[in-house]
Amino acid sequence: MGYQTKTRITALVIHGILICGAIIMMIPFIWMVLTAFKTRGQSISVDPFYIFPNGSWQFGNFSQVWNSYNFLTLYFNTLLMILLRVIFACLTATMAGYALGRLNFPFKRLIFALVLIQMMVPSQIFIIPQYLMVSGLGMLNTQFALLFPGMVTAFGTYLLKQGYQTLPKELEEAAEIDGCNIWQRFYKIMMPLARSSMVSLGIFTALFAYKDMMWPMIVCTNSSATTLAAALAKLQGQFTSNYPQLMAGAVMAVIPMLMIYLFFQKQFVEGIATSGGKL
Amino acid sequence: MKRKLTRKQKTEAKWGLIMVTPTLIGLLVLNFYPIVQTIYLSLCKTGDFGIGNVFIGFGNYIDAFKDPEVFQAMINTFKYAIVTVPIGISISLVLAVLLNRKMKGRTFYRTIYFLPMICAPAAVAMVWRWMYNMDFGLINHALGTNTGWITDPSVAWICVAVVGIWSGLGYNMVLLLGGLQDIPKDYYEAATIDGASGFHTFFNITIPMLSPMLFFIIQTGIIGALQLFDLPFMIMDTTSRAFSSVKPITYLFYEQSFIYSNRGYGAAIVVVMLVIIGIITFAIQRLEKKWVFYN
Amino acid sequence: MKKVSALLLSSVMSLSLLSGCSSSKDSIKVAIWDNNQLAGLEQIADDWSKDSGVNVDFEVLDWSSYWTMLEAGVSGGELPDVFWMHSAYSQMYSDAGVLLDMNSYIENDDAIELNNYYPGITELYNSNGTQFAMPKDHDTIAVVYNKAVFDKYGVSYPTSDWTWEEFAQISQEITDKGKADGVYGTYMNTGSNQSGWYNIVYSFGGSIVNADKTKSGLDDAASLKAMKFVADKILPTCPSQDSMANTGGDTMLVSGKIGMYLDGSWMANAYYSADNKDDLAWVEIPYEDVNGDGQAQKEERVSIYNGLGWSIYKDSANADASWSLVSALTSKEGQQKQSELGVTMAAYEGVSEAWTQSFEGMDLSAFSDVEENGTLVFRPYTKYTGRWEDAMSTKLISAWNNPSTMTDVCKQIAAEMNATIAAE
């Protein structure tokens, strides 16, 4: 067997595995999209493979959901919240991560323990105390309220600490010999190198912010100040289970996230892949 | 044995403290104050809305240790973590390694595997619940079975774990991909020149170089799994026979604190859980030195 | 690149400041949890705004966020001006002293006379003589059946003159004839309490909680007899408990998997919006011929009922205007409108007829007829209803899967309930 056939077979096997996996990953998602185009009756039809008998796609579900909420405002609020949380998380976590991963200073172990403890506590215990802080500041129903719990991130600090620890020592030592002080070493050399960890952090912060439902619902009760996830939850109402409309809402909420993800994936993840090779 | 710090060490300490301060202040205000409050509440018989709390010492803890529901919920939570963490991480590691190469359709695959991450959790749970449905569900129809996926206690917990793994794959995969891309390419080039096999390179270069990220994922994965909250509740009805065998400890805390307004008892449950997670976390942290390769 | 990000950041900052302006003083914040009722309630509130010049902002939250928001609000001293109250939480909120004492307002308001409302609801929202919420609506229970299923198996439609025994017979008949298709007569899960077996327990003369709310009634002889009836006659004609835990009864009924189902008036809208709504019809809840005279006495036909209340925040800056709004919503006229708009049945007695006719093509008089020829029993509650009610439906799962153990399980539940209630 020649080298070429061997690589070709390997590639085929890999594609086979990936495609099978992709199909499994996709099924629930396809199901969600298809349900969004069904009537209520069809959605609870006995035969789940019963799909659009007369080619009648129910676009009405989308327009009904679109009309019941001001989606443009929701998109705007959600994007703004995501942007603010990402900026804050990256700024604070990159500094703290560098310090914890690369520098020696008093109480370092204690501070890192605090970071870990924060991660161990279920976030439900923070909701009411944090609500009281925001309401005490008179900031309910504002963007500040949406940002508030995301101003610092234990998860991100830990993530970036690990990221900085992966980087080779030699670069920093070389910079030190060149006369760079700690801040310069961090800002000019190490931070750009930890970019991929920061992109990961950005993506996850964005995702967690986007998925956060309870917090926006409680601090931003005005429908003009709330976010997509919170509006989706409201859509559920108490007594109804109108699957097609819920799925239509879910699809509409996913679309902007999908675009952001595709954008990031192209701009950053692959950009790093090529620049990383130059090291 | 107190050594005087050199000037260099002093500057380093100064910068370290400056850089960690914003995060530290945020954590203290946003998170530690509530944690301390919770610990205090766990020692109280609480009135509604936190009014009229009476300090009772360890009464809530004694009740919690006697409560078979707490014990069962602990077991449920650990079972979930033991199954989802290793399986989820292994699959995502394989995916990340497969995708970390120049190949056709890479962006496509990545996007697909990442899709569950960008769906609202309520929608994810709803779709799965519907697919697992005994009479109308896709799975029973496709397989021609009549299994109560979310009511039979022997399979229900696996079905919950499947959803957990499914929704977490993309998350682990992206982190691992990021880690893989931070590995300098010349290491691989050197290995290729030395004639090392793919298998060899994977275990001698990829795994050690990836170990900080891998460790991070294991650590956060375990913590995340132990904090499993409302996934079982969203996938199955509370009248399911299987519900008591999947109900996680965090949900029990939420139920006591917010639904039954028994905040002191809920706080005690959460503190017990915190101690257990803490022990595990610090045990893992100790192992870090042994396992993890830092450059 | 740097410029762009700086620009972005500054614009973000200025925008976030803009969105920080709070709502004007001349508006009342109202919080509710049911999206279905929003349109109708807004219409009533709009009419009120025209007269008063005060705007009303409605907020709809889902059930669990609603109560978390209120709970956080009590601790933080900031609640919506006007909000819904429910039997599961009402005692807690009234004990916490955050709800406006409405007594003096009621006295001075000619449009409000408490005797005109269903007594169970008025009493629920009254604590030691203090009225802390105005009755908003009430709901009752009836049987919805799928005509297509009855036609298919040649079973004649039920009429209001039927006993629980006859209900079980019809259910058995459909189950027998539908065996091949996997179709069952009816559906009753452990959690189908208010719209399920509670009704049977009370029509047999039993109870869930005794009259002074100090003890469980589930171990009374009549209650046990009712539960034995459920186990022996109803459950064999239902889908398996597993199947019921997978799918709600409403879905099963609409899709033709079961023939009939007990459900509450709050679900009428959901059935009305079904594609096959013409197949669905309502009939009055059956009675239990306790005294054996072959006729339905009032006390033999029982529907459990419940009702929400309108509460006002004690420290609301707009307490007077808030009362005026609540008064507009709960006066005879407001209740009539709520009923005509198809929002819900009224809490005001005698104006719910309009609601039963507000869904064109679907007759809902089964919900109001039971008030004429039956008895309404208020949904059983104590201070912490949730604590025993959840435990009850969990405990019953084993009895549902093993109907012969029903009596023993009920006795166990009663013992546990007594302990829970004693701890209140």
Image (spheres, coloured by chain):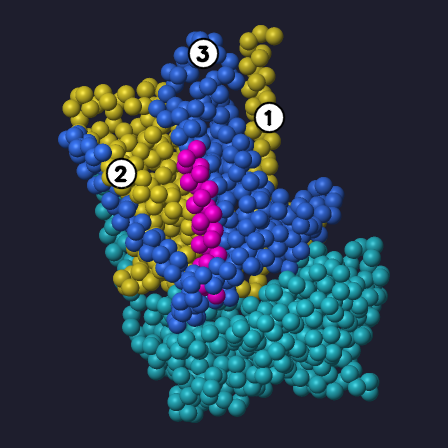
Q: Which chain is yellow?
A: A
What's the mark number on residue A95?
2
What's the mark number on residue B192?
3
Callout 2, which amino acid? Met
Task: Please tell me which residue is depicted at 20% across the width and 35% down the height of the picture.
Answer: B2
- Crowding around mark 3 (Cα neighbors within 10 Å: few <14, some 14 to 19, many 20+) is few
Q: Is residue B215 left or right of residue A150?
A: right
Magenta stretch: give its range: B262-287
Which structural element holds mark 3?
Answer: helix
- Crowding around mark 2 (Cα neighbors within 10 Å: few <14, some 14 to 19, many 20+) is many
Which percent across, then down, holds residue C175?
Answer: 81, 62
Residue picked out by circle 1: A16
Magenta stretch encompasses residue B284: yes
Q: Which chain is blue?
A: B
Callout 3, which amino acid? Thr
| Count of marks, rendered view | 3
Q: Quadrant of the C terminus of chain B?
A: top left
Colour seen for chain C: cyan
Which structural element holds mark 2?
Answer: helix
Callout 1, which amino acid? Gly
Which structural element holds mark 1?
Answer: helix
Q: Is residue B167 left or right of residue C168?
A: left
Q: Nearer the viewer, residue B62 or B263?
A: B62
1 and 3 marks on the same chain: no
Q: State how far apart marks 1 and 2 are (Cα).
A: 43 Å
- The chain holding disc 2 is A
Q: Nearer the viewer, mark 1 or mark 3?
A: 3
Q: Is residue A176 left or right of residue B112?
A: left
